[in-house]
């Protein structure tokens, strides 16, 4: 069985864009964007650790069992710490992408 041959006209304006001299991917200003994102990553990691520290509260020991340690985990602070860590990871990936685009040259 053969596939039918269709001759549809090609849509206008849907091809690859023509390369321009000024619109290349190699843009050094992306390095500054990456540096700013790395600063934000540092702040988010600090916020993550701070939120996690506030979310874990040691409880009093039991007199009969002094070897047992109890922790109370506050869900709102732990959730905020996870959200900050996730945002830091996404920004770190984007900072790497921005750095690659800042230093990459066209062949």
Image: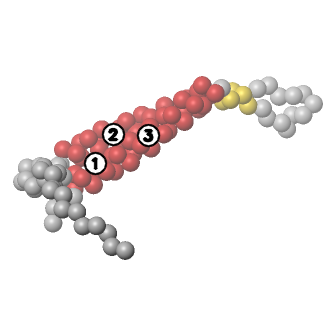
| Residue 57 tag number | none
Q: Name the residue: 38% across, 48% down.
A: 93
Disc 3 vs disc 1: Cβ atoms closer than 8 Å? no
Q: Is residue 44 visible?
A: yes
Q: How far from the left and from the top, in percent, is residue 38?
A: 35, 42
Under tag 1, what secondary structure?
helix
Name the residue that disc number 3 marks: 88
Under tag 2, what secondary structure?
helix
Residue farthest to the right, as pictured: 64
Compared with 33, 12 (above or below) is below
Compared with 54, 16 (above or below) is below
**Label 3, residues with CA under 10 Å away: few <14, some 14-19, many ≥20:** many
Q: Name the residue: 48% across, 39% down.
A: 86
Q: Is residue 49 visible?
A: no
In the visual, does 38 lie left or right of 45?
A: left
Disc 2 vs disc 1: Cβ atoms closer than 8 Å? yes
Q: How far from the left and from the top, in percent, is residue 28?
A: 17, 49
Compared with 31, 72 (above or below) is above
Q: Name the residue: 15% across, 52% down.
A: 11
Query: In front here: 22 or 99?
Result: 22
Name the residue that disc number 2 marks: 37
Disc 3 vs disc 2: Cβ atoms closer than 8 Å? no
Name the residue that disc number 1 marks: 98
- Residue 61 is drawn in which quadrant? top right
Labels 2 and 1: the sequence-earlier one: 2
In the visual, does 81 lie left or right of 90?
A: right
Labels 3 and 1: the sequence-earlier one: 3
Q: How far from the left and from the top, in percent, is residue 70?
A: 78, 32
Under tag 3, what secondary structure?
helix
Q: Name the residue: 26% across, 41% down.
A: 33
């Amino acid at each position: 069985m053969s596939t039918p041959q269709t001759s549809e006209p090609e849509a206008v304006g849907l091809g690859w864009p023509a390369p321009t001299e000024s619109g290349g991917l190699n843009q050094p200003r992306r390095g500054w964007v990456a540096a700013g994102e790395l600063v934000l990553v540092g702040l988010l990691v600090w916020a993550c650790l701070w939120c996690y520290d506030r979310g874990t509260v040691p409880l009093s020991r039991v007199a009969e069992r002094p070897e047992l340690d109890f922790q109370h985990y506050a869900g709102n602070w732990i959730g905020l710490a996870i959200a900050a860590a996730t945002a830091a990871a996404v920004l770190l990936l984007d900072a790497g992408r921005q750095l690659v685009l800042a230093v990459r040259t066209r062949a």
